[in-house]
Amino acid sequence: MKLFATAYAPPLSYLRGMNQENEVQMEVHEFFVKQTLRNRTHILSPNGIQALIIPVKHENRTKTPVKDLKISNDSNWQRQHWRSLDAAYRRSAFFEFYADDLAPFYEKEYTYLHDFNTAVLEWLLGVYKINIQITPNNTFEKELPASETDCRTLCDTGVPVFNHSEKSYPQVFSYKESFTPGLSAYDLVFNMGPACNSYL
């Protein structure tokens, strides 16, 4: 069994870890770790790599389990993120094809980070045709038994992981720079559409 941390529109390495699995577990009891992919994702904008960060509430300055971590909706972050996605991908081959299905996640107000991340992840899994059952874990364990695989570290960085063995695909702004790996799974969806599953 593999154990994953919650992530906002995670990179391909995360989805690749889930691909061809029947069931995985989601970590919901760990304390939230700042400046990681748990509340941020990266896209390729006209000005280069751009981080989209979901603001979260740090209530009472205590450590908060991921399942209880609330989003700070004081700023209109969803509108800002959607505008950034539109600016980055409106000229991509498939943004308009998926926009109507994706937009509601940036219109509905979510209270908890885990709920928003899960909703977006389930949408991505559907697009990538990854049929998998995800169940929450029961308790936090720092060290997992040998029978389990710890995939939580896939989210431990707040910057794109540049895996140069990642096969390139067409990107909107690749004419400005060479292929950029390590981006949100959104990037492959908008640039490759239904072929994203074959690439994965």
Image (cartoon, rainbow, N blue to C red):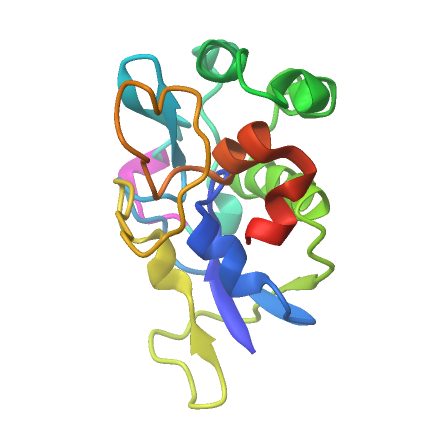
Residue drawn at point x = 27 percent, y = 52 percent: 164
Q: Position of residue 125 (x, y in %)?
A: 66, 48
Location of residue 81 in the rendering, given as x and y in whole percent from the top left corner: 47, 17
- Could you say which is closer to the camera, residue 156 or residue 33? 156
Q: Does 83 appear in magenta? A: no
Q: Is 6 or 125 nearer to us in this picture?
A: 125
For the point 60% across and 68% down, the residue is: 24
Write down the quadrant of residue 175 in the picture.
top left
**In the picture provided, is 131 more to the left or to the right than 183?**
right
Vertical relation: 137 (above or below) 168: below
Image quadrant where residue 109 sits: top right
Q: Is residue 18 above or below residue 166?
A: below
Residue 47 in view of the camera: yes
Q: Is residue 34 above or below residue 5?
A: above
Residue at x-position 70% and y-position 71%: 22
Query: Which residues, given as a range, are shown in magenta?
Result: 59-64
Q: Which quadrant: the C terminus?
A: bottom right
Question: Which quadrant: the N terminus?
Answer: bottom right
Q: Position of residue 156 (x, y in %)?
A: 30, 53
Residue 78 placement, left or right of 20: left
x, y percent for residue 132: 70, 62
Res. 28 visible in picture: no
